[in-house]
Structures are given as structure tokens and as C-alpha cells.
Amino acid sequence: MPVCNALTVDLEDWYHGYCAIPSPAVAPDQRRVRPNTEAILALLADCRVKATFFVLGSVAAEDPTLVPMIAAAGHEIASHGYSHTLVTQLGPQRFRDELKKTADILADQCGEAPAGFRAPQWSLGPSTAWAMDILKEQGYCYDSSWNPLPVVGDPRGPRGPFRVETTRGGLLEIPPMVSRSIIGNLPTGGGWGFRFWPRSMIRRTIEGLNGQGLPAVLYLHPRELDPFGPRLPLSRFQSFVSYGPRTDASVRLRELLKRYQFTTLKELAAAWQPA
Ligand SMILES: [Zn+2]
């Protein structure tokens, strides 16, 4: 049987990158998350793929019709926290408060509490073990934040799902896809790397992981389907990391969604048997 992969969407707006603009400062007519999400849903329907949406609680609160629309199409609703503040900046109590607040909003809007979590900008990993304890305490089944990349994560980390021991028992970690290279792991699962590196390299990575029985976890932001949408005033480096090549990510994504098998992270987590 072919290995199932996962497409994940970090559901936030164009101004959430680098937390540069607090969301109340953006007028409703400046928001772009809804049309971009509709474009993602149309793509998923066309490719008959169910995806996992890590929803930012503040975005769900601002537009209470978004989550029901995504859930009605059969996709998984998971949590991306509330304010897009880095986990390292929140600390344990505010992290717990954000988790609860977001879970309440999402459960209210789609009838089910989130089973999975992804931290803003991969800000959860081996150095924030306390956050895994709190996820377990709050009833989460999995996390998808430990990016095996230099700078933003731990490049020595596993490329496939693994169990993290917390004080309350094990929690499954499902890392995003990276490609091995002679200069280290490269971001090919999403963001600028997904739009930048050759398609053949992305396909090879997916097939390499699947050949080892591991899922490839891709990630996408709604703003990546909106290459000429508004941009934050960022430094050159941040700007490249955020926007990289100005292309519509859905073009190459469509190819992959049609070529390989995809399911939600919740389903992958439920079926996961460690090797
Ligand atoms: Zn995010």
C-alpha cells in the first residue's frame, strides 16, 4: 500500500508573518485570508485531498464563518495558537491560556476540539519540552512543530514521526519535510524552499521518505497563493524567507496532490506504528 502524506495549512493572514503587525491594527477590508482559503479549498476539492488546517484562534474569532466552511469540506481543524506569538516568548502560562482559548473557539465553531498543534514559526522543539507537557495535559494527540532545519529547528532531529516523552506520557511529533543535502537539511516541504527548489528535488524527497515508510508533511500559508498580495516591511533576509520567489505555490502543489496519496495528520497519527 502506498504511504500517505499530509498537506498542512497554517491558517493565518498576510500580516501574521514575524508578528510585525498586531491583527487589530488591520482593517477588515485589508484581510486576505478568506479569498485565499477559498482558493485552497477549491484546489483540494479538485484534487480530492483532505488536509489539516492549523488555525490561528484570532483569525477564527475575526471571521467565525471560516472554520465551519473548512470543516464542512471534510478537512481537519487543528490549532496554531491564538496570537501568533512565538512559544518561546509566551512561556508556560500564556502558552496554556492561548491553547485553551483557541481550542474553545475551534470546538465552538466546528464541534470538535483540536487534536493537533503547530507552533508559530517552528518555535517549539527540544528546548521547549515544557510545551509538550502542556499539549499532552490539554489532550492533544500530536504536535507538528519540530522542524529538522538549522536556525529555526534542530537539524539533527528525525525526519519522520517519533514519540516524545512528556511528564504525562508520550506525544507524537510529526515533523515537516526537509531534503538532505551536502550542506545540511533544506526546506523543501513548504515556504520559500517549496517554491524555490526544483520540482524534481521535491518529488525525490517525497519518494525517498515514502520508500522508508515515512510520510512527507508539506505546509502552506494562504498568502502563498496570493503572490502579489500585500507585503510586510521586513529586512532583506526576513523578506526572502517570507516571500522568496513570488510564485503561486498552488501550481506545483496541484501536481503533487494529484501524484501522491494524502490524508490528514490526525489520520496519520491514528494509524502510526513506530518502526
Ligand atoms: Zn504561522
Image: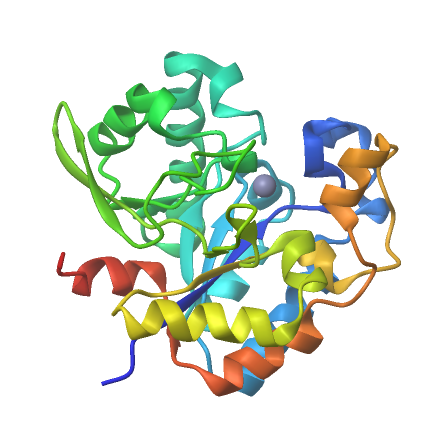
- Visual colour scheme: rainbow
Q: Quadrant of ligand 1?
A: top right
* Image vertical order of residue 168 relative to residue 223, above or below: above
Q: Is residue 258 left or right of residue 235?
A: left
Q: Quadrant of the C terminus?
A: bottom left
Give the residue at x 73% y 55%. Answer: 223
Residue 62, located in which quarter of the rendered image? top right
Asked whether the viewer can see residue 221, the reply is no
Give the residue at x 37% y 15%. Answer: 92
Give the residue at x 31% y 55%. Answer: 160
* Image vertical order of residue 254 relative to residue 33, above or below: below
Give the residue at x 61% y 80%. Answer: 254
Residue 166 location in percent, x, y? 17, 27
Asked whether the viewer can see residue 260, the reply is yes
For the residue pair 1 and 70, the one nearer the viewer reads as 1
Q: Is residue 177 left or right of residue 4?
A: right
Residue 27, located in which quarter of the rendered image? top right
Q: Is residue 199 left or right of residue 160?
A: right
Q: Quadrant of the N terminus?
A: bottom left
Residue farthest to the front? 182
Number of callouts in the render? Answer: 0
For the residue pair 82 and 270, the one nearer the viewer reads as 270
* Image vertical order of residue 162 relative to residue 92, above or below: below
Residue 240 location in percent, x, y? 79, 44
Residue 198 location in percent, x, y? 67, 70
Residue 30 location in percent, x, y? 85, 46
